Image (cartoon, rainbow, N blue to C red):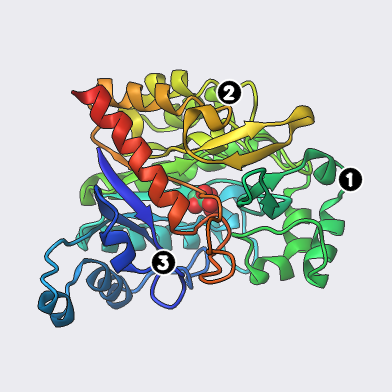
Amino acid sequence: MKMGFRWYGEGNDTVSLDDIRQIPGVQTVVWSLHHKQAGEVWEEAEIAAEIATITGLTDEHRSRGVTKTLDAEVVESVNVHESIKLGTTVLGMSRDEAIANYVTTIERLGRAGVKVVCYNFMPVFDWLRTDLFHPLPDGSTALFYDQKVVDGLTPEKLIADMAAGTGALTMPGWEPERLAHFAELNEAYQGVTHGDMYAHYKYFLDAVIPTCEEYDVKLGVHPDDPAFDLFGWPRVVSTKDDLATVLSLNDSVYNGLTLCLGSFSSNPEAAAVDAVRTFMDRIHFTHVRNIKHLPGGSFTEVGHRASEGSVDTIGIMKAYAEAGFTGYVRPDHGRHLWDENTTRRPRPGYGLYDRALGTQYLLGLWDAFRS
Ligand code: DNO
């Protein structure tokens, strides 16, 4: 297992590479080119520059005796253009053009030494929460999902709230560019079934996987978050059966999972440890974190320790350790702690402290179960 830590890039993150380097056991920086829109090709020079930033040590480091280096083997995410999910031309791009660009990006990442690429296949938008700084009883804040708030909304109301900046909902991962095209996207998804989505998904995988095999880049799909349909749009990576279906669309081991156990567990029926054991051979990257289920389908995020919430993070790490998991793991969605909200003002869910604590809990479990 290799422990990773997500980083949004220089000038785009309140956490520094030096901070990450000092977290014991962290080897891999999980990165992306966050200015790239879905469908765009990633340029070789941009990839090389980002990797050099992550992996390099400066003279200033050397003068302080710093020798620990980080690797840049995991990208989260190369986003999939909506035309691929819809199997048609949308937002001015055909699916074949979007797939060709995806293939080029994979080739370039592979040549640059990237081993795993994470992506998701959620219609219209990425993850959704109703409160990004929900107060917890210990005085920290965390991401929160209130089903009642979502039930009271239509996508149009959601978009209007977002545009006005006053809404109850705030969605990281939601680019203003997409917001502007919401009506076109919403229209395009009308009548699209789960079966249609799987057919489009297979077309995508069959086109991309040969390149992944050639360049030794494993794909890992991230589960829907939350892991159920929203606003009537078909989500196809939510349940254990969905994960099995996705893996069966293309049998190559390069078609694998980024098993985010927090997202997967947002559906109270989900059995996280069972999913880890079932899909072990196809899990290339995993996010291990905890949430606490609340009545009515709502949930709050909590610290990584199993007893803090509803996700059996002990059982999860035991399963990975017993299997001798060789993929990448990272903590996820920390609470915002200590002076963080007033000083560093982190990206919601991506502060330093709680994620750093999370790594130590996960590594402690790994060490205990491996020995
Ligand atoms: C949120 C993340 C997601 C994830 C993407 C993967 O914190 O877990 O935005 O990176 O869904 O493509």
What's under tag 3, amino acid-wise? Val
Numbered tag placed on residue 339 in the rendering: none
Q: Quadrant of residue 366?
A: top left
Q: Residue at x 87, y 58 (%)?
A: 157
Is disc 1 surrounded by few (<14), some (14 to 19) or many (20+) residues within 10 Å?
few
Q: Position of residue 71 (x, y in %)?
A: 22, 58
* Comes first in the chain, label 1 or label 2: 1
Residue closest to the eye, 149 or 362: 362
Position of 152 with respect to 285 (left or right) is right
Position of 225 with respect to 28 (left or right) is right
The residue at which mark 2 appears reads as: 270
Position of 51 with respect to 123 (left or right) is left
Is disc 2 surrounded by few (<14), some (14 to 19) or many (20+) residues within 10 Å?
some
Does the residue at mark 3 contact the one at mark 1 (Cβ under 8 Å)? no
Q: Height in image: 322 above or below 205?
A: above
The residue at which mark 1 appears reads as: 152
* Comes first in the chain, label 3 or label 1: 3
Numbered tag placed on residue 15 in the rendering: 3
What's under tag 2, amino acid-wise? Ala
Q: Height in image: 125 above or below 286?
A: below
- Secondary structure type for disc 2: loop
- Secondary structure type for disc 3: loop
Is disc 3 surrounded by few (<14), some (14 to 19) or many (20+) residues within 10 Å?
many
* Comes first in the chain, label 2 or label 3: 3
